[in-house]
Amino acid sequence: MPTPSMEDYLEKIYSLIEEKGYARVSDIAEALAVHPSSVTKMVQKLDKDKYLVYEKYRGLVLTPKGKKIGKRLVHRHTLLEEFLRLIGVDEEHIYKDVEGIEHHLSWESITCIEYLMAYFEQDPQRSVELLRIKQEDEQKEEES
C-alpha cells in the first residue's frame, strides 16, 4: 500500500495524465509545489514499487496498478470535496480540509461516505433540511 506522500504523487500524476495526456517531472513539481529533484526521487520509488515506469528524459507511464490506484485516489478526493460541499463547509476551506483528512480515512469510511452521498442524492430535500438545521444552529450561536 502506498504511503500518504506516494498517494499524493499518484493522484496528481493520474490527474495530469487525464488532463494533458502526459505528466512530466516539471509538471508534477509545479502542481505539488515541490522541487523537481523531490519528484524525481519519488517517481523512482513509484517505479521501483511498480506503480509507474520511469525513464529519465523520456517521461513516465502509469502501470495498470498505478492507474487503478490513481483513479481511486482522484475519486476519493472528489468524493470528499463533494461531501464537504454537501454538508455546508465553506468553499474556501474545502480543498485544505480534504488534503488534511483524505489519508486518514479508511476505505471502509470512504465507502460509507459514498452511501451517505447516495442517500442525500436520492432526495435533494434531505440536503435542504440539513443546511436549514445548520443555519438555525449558526443563528443560535450568533444570538448567544
Image (cartoon, rainbow, N blue to C red):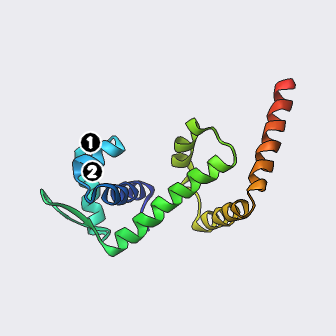
Which residue is located at x 56 percent, y 50 percent?
81
Please tell me whether residue 48 is drawn above or below residue 94 in the rendered image. below
Is residue 103 among what the camera can see? no
Q: Quadrant of the C terminus?
A: top right
Give the residue pinned by disc 2. Answer: 39
User: How far across and down, in percent of the image, does residue 18 sit?
Assistant: 34, 60
In the picture, measured across the screen, residue 106 lies left or right of residue 22, that is: right
Question: Residue 126's spot in the image, x, y percent?
Answer: 78, 55
Q: Amino acid at mark 2?
A: Val
**Image coords of residue 74 (percent x, y):** 46, 59
On screen, residue 68 above or below 35:
below
Residue ranking furthest to the front: 124
Residue 25 vertical placement versus 71 (above, below): above
Q: Residue 91: in sight, yes or no? A: yes
Residue sitting at x 83%, y 37%: 137
Q: Position of residue 130 (x, y in %)?
A: 78, 49
Query: Which residue is more in the foreground, 90 or 50?
Result: 90
Amino acid identity at mark 1: His
Residue at 27% across / 60% down in the picture?
21
Q: Report crowding for label 2: few under 14, some 14 to 19, many 20 or more residues within 10 A (C-alpha).
A: many
Q: Which residue is mark 1?
A: 35
Please state which of residues 93 and 5 is positioned toward the viewer in this rendering: 93
Quarter occupied by the N terminus: bottom left
Q: Secondary structure at mark 2?
A: helix
Q: Residue 142 is drawn in which quadrant? A: top right
**Cβ atoms at labels 1 and 2 below 8 Å apart:** yes
Vertical side of 136 occupied by 2: above or below: below
Q: Residue at x 78, y 54 (%)?
A: 125
| Cα separation between marks 1 and 2 | 7 Å
Q: Secondary structure at mark 1?
A: loop
Q: Which of the pair 9/104 is nearer the observer? A: 9
